[in-house]
Image: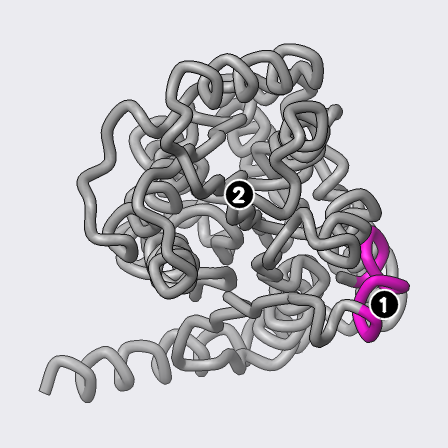
Amino acid sequence: MKKFVKSLLLSAAMATSAMTGAAHAEGEQFVWISHGPDSDSWFNVIKNAIKITSEQMGVTTEYRNPPTGDLADMARLVQQASAAGVDGIIVTIADYNVLEGPIKDAIAKGIPVITVNSGTVEESQKLGALMHVGQPEYEAGLGAGKRAKEAGVTSFLCVNHYITNPQSVERCRGYADGIGVELGSQMIDSGMDPSEVQNKVKAYLTANPETNGILTLGPNSAEPSIRAVKDMGLDGEIYFGTFDLSAEISAGIKDGTVAFAIDQQPFLQGSIPIQVLTNYVRYGVAPSNSIFTGPGFVTKDNIEMVEKLAGEFR
């Protein structure tokens, strides 16, 4: 019954939008707001997707982010986009409590919002967004943990380079649950400085020699961790998994240092919301469910197929 009522409400909203959206033939203006600092290269694929898809759809989409990753700055970016009266906002739910007010204010003004990447479907629905496009982070971590358990991992390190984002902790928690242990001091706040990450990983592995598994949450933590493992002569000896792809991660998979990388397909996260918003604003149509873009696992078995696209499309 609830699903039926929700469907009726969505249909009514789309019908209203269709009547008012006929005036928007092309050239809509959207803003894509991420939590990623300027130093996070992972969002380069998102930016590429935004450029390509905006050209395909005949719209303008501006990518904005807080230069240092400060979430208060990110909230202000949402407020600025809302005040400018853009045709739609795409935003990561880096921290629900910080972003709830600005996002709900935008929706109250009649600006359609799609949440993406960080956050959950439940949080997106509570905000009143059209949909969520991304990867269920706990489930992705859980899948990684189950793989690690099958490989014999009993003690692990989770290297968290953006611990201020609650969804990053969900990745580590899912990994711990997949192995069958509680998450505690195995998760470290590594920061993003490569030298600092590398030193913290070395220090942890030295103090906890029983550690036989590592999970990193993206290139910012993976690449220095790969160097730390190699410096310590543990490459191939410690079961190493990571989120996301980069050239160095791909090389690690090929040489046996990295067992797998979780691909959440950022190109789709950059592209799908623009496609959906364009059709919603113009014609009042939108998918009725959120869209999951991951997790997918990249291993030695399929790395040749995806590595040439890493950093641009994968």
Q: Name the residue beneath numbered marker 2.
A: 238
**Residue drawn 45% across and 18% down?**
204
Q: Along the horizontal axis of the image, is 112 left or right of 127?
A: right
Q: How crowded is the residue under tag 2: few (<14 C-alpha within 10 Å), some, or many (20+)?
A: some
Q: Quadrant of residue 313?
A: bottom right
**Which residue is drawn at the image coordinates 59% and 28% (left, top)?**
77
Residue 14, percent across and down? 45, 78
Which amino acid lies under the numbered mark 1 shown in the image of this protein? Answer: Gly
Q: Residue furthest left?
A: 1
In percent of the image, x 28 and y 57: which residue is there?
178
In depth, the one of 91 and 284 nearer the eye is: 91
Whether 306 is among the magenta residues is: yes
- The secondary structure type at the circle numbered 1 is loop
Question: Which residue is label 1 attached to?
Answer: 58
Q: Is residue 27 above or below residue 33?
A: below
Task: Check the image and report above or below for 278 versus 128.
Answer: below
Residue range highlighted in magenta: 304-313
Q: Which image quarter is the N terminus in? A: bottom left
Q: Is residue 247 above or below residue 207?
A: below
In this view of the protein, which residue sits in the foreground, 135 or 92?
A: 135
Whichever of labels 1 and 2 marks the residue nearer the N terminus, that label is 1
For the question of whether residue 34 can be seen, the reply is yes
Q: Where does the image place residue 83, in percent across and percent down from the top left?
A: 57, 32
Q: Answer left or right for 305 relative to 116.
A: right
